[in-house]
Amino acid sequence: MGKKRDRWDSSSEDETDDNNTKSTGRDNKSSKRKPTSNEPNTRYSEKEAVPSSINQDTPPRLSVPLHNPLLQGCRSVYDTYDRIARLSEGTYGIVWKAKDLVTKEIVALKQIKFDPQIQQQQGFPVTALREINVLLALSHENIVSVREMVVGSDVDKVFMVMEFFSLDLQEAVERRKYPNVLRQAELKGVLQQILRGTEYMHSQWYMHRDMKTSNILVHETGRVALCDFGLARRYQDPPINCTQLVVTLWYRAPELLFGEEKYTPAIDIWSIGCIFGELIQQEAMMQGQGELDQIDKIFSMLGAPDESSWPEFSSLPSAKIFRWRSASSSAASTQGLRQLFPINPPPHFKQTFLDGNGFDLLTKLLTLNPKKRITAKEALKHPYFHKGVAPALPNFFDDTML
Ligand SMILES: Nc1ncnc2c1ncn2[C@@H]1O[C@H](COP(=O)(O)OP(=O)(O)O)[C@@H](O)[C@H]1O
Ligand SMILES: [Mg+2]
């Protein structure tokens, strides 16, 4: 076996020779890959000015045409890509940074994890199949694009080749902590792009079901894209029963917490509301310790639902078994939320100011009743994006601009 073959075949534990290959856990903040100034290639060395408007400069996408595995068969990873670094190791796979041997383009390879026991029963892992299917069906600049699938020597070595992004949004938020908080235009720019990707995805009848900052990628140009479609699925109208075991707790919509099985893409919109708040606060907004605590945090911030604000609430499976502190949850009040995003912030306020329009949009994203929650399409028309400072591509890379 040649050297390249060895590199792709070695297990995740024996990565002592790679630059930056130390493992990083899924959603484990402390162990995620950290930006460093001496990192090779594209990640932080090429400094770019921040274009003033998102609509002006459409960042480049991969130039090589999609390889069609149905027509040509999957190429071998050894002949096509050189491994550079391990970016992350999660529940469903390892993500590598790699270089195309011919074009020299930098790409990301998600190596699908095979559990021998599950493999025996189910064959190819279902989450990976789901992700590949959904991503091949979607094509939008705010959704990560898949280039091809490549295979290794064994049947259990399969890689999804994607365009490469320098950071995920969780890492990006870390880079823009006080005093380098996001400018208003950048905040609008990030949110607008997330909503554009989501509007497109929902228009194609897919819901993501795991929207959170670590599942959103940031390109050096400031382009933002949704990724990790392992939990995504098609939806229909009227909705049908789906599993409730979706969405990471801190981003989970109230209808899911109360056991709704016929949920809709509105669950993604709730998560976007949480992400919007996180971009401003520089940490996750509602960090519940369990489902009950999560519900408590939501109601303390937004008030508890009542007959008029959410008539269907009382018939949700878990509505009766949960008791929440009624004292802290006055009906349909956004007072708790206002305290976090004040109209008159004190001097030396440590977060980006959210004006009236911004606050209005946040409350519409974080509406308890999923039927009344704003849609991605409506949110994009909200005055927040069309009045005042215009949305701009964010800059998470050039330290001199921060
Ligand atoms: N195309 C990509 N470019 C750069 N980094 C990526 C890319 N895709 C994923 N990552 C990184 O790998 C992490 C895990 O990938 P993800 O698709 O979310 O899988 P998991 O199911 O393990 O969460 C992401 O949070 C991100 O940091
Ligand atoms: Mg993920």
Image: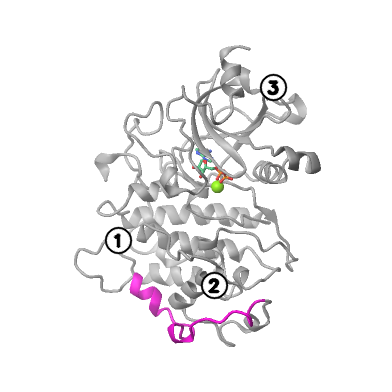
- Point out which mark residue 351 bears: 1
Vertical placement of 331 versus 59: above or below? below
Determine if the magenta segment contains residue 90. no
Q: Which residue is mark 3?
A: 153
Distance Cα–Cα, label 2 vs label 3: 47 Å
Determine if the magenta segment contains residue 328. yes
Vertical placement of 291 versus 149: above or below? below
Distance Cα–Cα, label 1 vs label 3: 50 Å
Looking at the picture, which amino acid does disc 3 mark? Ser
Nearest the eye: 22 or 257: 22
Looking at the picture, which amino acid does disc 2 mark? Leu
Looking at the picture, which amino acid does disc 1 mark? Gln
Of the image marks 2 and 3, the number of the one nearer the N terminus: 3
Task: Name the mark nearer the viewer: 2 or 3.
Answer: 2
Q: Residue furthest top?
A: 2
Instruction: Write the residue at 24% across / 53% down.
Output: 179
Per the picture, the main secondary structure of the magenta-coloured stretch is loop
Q: State the SS at label 3.
A: loop
Q: In the drawing, does residue 366 fall left or right of residue 243?
A: left
For the question of whether residue 380 can be seen, the reply is no
Distance Cα–Cα, label 1 vs label 2: 28 Å
**Residues in magenta?**
318-340
Q: Residue furthest right?
A: 121
Q: Which residue is mark 2?
A: 292
Q: State the SS at label 1.
A: loop
- Residue 317 image position (x, y, % from top left): 69, 76
